[in-house]
Image: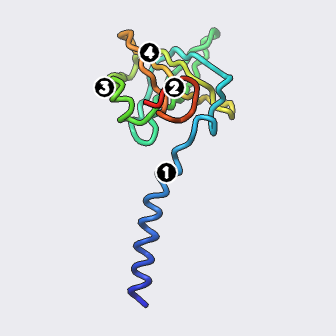
Amino acid sequence: MRHILGLLTVMAIGLATFVAPVSAHHSFAAEFDGSKAIRLVGKLTKVDWSNPHTYFFLDIQDDKGKVTNWACEGGGPGALSRRGLNKGDLKLGDTIVVDGYRAKDGSNLIDARRVTLPDGRSIYGGTPGDGGPGDNGQ
């Protein structure tokens, strides 16, 4: 009996370890609105370079001087690196341009489809195969 309980415990831990990362991944349509394109130009304040999605944060200043922080969701680190964007390319304080689509819930979150760096390089920032606009499956 102890052997069976031990085996079940190990299986449960293994399943929980597998399921947790998978649940964080989602399709474009689950969270973003393909009809709400937006362009952000702002200063980079934070970079979270981890799987399954990278996140970077921009301070955006409106016409009245009010600053709002936006989260930009990109593809995973491996996908971005294959396209030529590495963590070291994103320097805090740099002004970058992000073209993407707003979150369905209206929060300050966008799906970063195109990221333009200060040196002029423009990188496809989306998640490969997510079905969003401009998805080329890379």
Give residue 13's quadrant in the image: bottom left
Residue indicated by mark 4: 116
Residue indicated by mark 1: 22
8, above or below 49, in the image: below
- What amino acid does circle 1 point to? Val
Give residue 62's quadrant in the image: top right
Task: Classify 10 Å Cα crowding around label 1: few (below 14), some (14-19), many (20 and above).
Answer: few
- CB atoms at circles 1 and 2 under 8 Å apart? no
Nearer to us in this view, 128 or 70: 128
Return the disc, 1 or 2, that comes first in the chain's sequence: 1
Of tags 4 and 3, the one toward the viewer is: 4
Distance (Cα) linking label 2 and label 4: 10 Å
- What amino acid does circle 4 point to? Thr
Relative image position of residue 95 (x, y in whole percent): 44, 14
Nearer to us in this view, 28 or 135: 135
Nearer to us in this view, 105 or 46: 105
Of tags 3 and 1, the one toward the viewer is: 1
Residue indicated by mark 2: 112
- What amino acid does circle 2 point to? Ala
Of tags 3 and 2, the one toward the viewer is: 2
Residue indicated by mark 3: 88
Q: Is residue 132 toward the left or the right of residue 35 in the image? A: left
- What amino acid does circle 3 point to? Gly
Residue under the point 53% across and 30% down? 71
35, above or below 26, in the image: above
Distance (Cα) linking label 4 and label 3: 14 Å
Q: Is residue 34 toward the left or the right of residue 130 in the image? A: right
Return the disc, 4 or 1, that comes first in the chain's sequence: 1
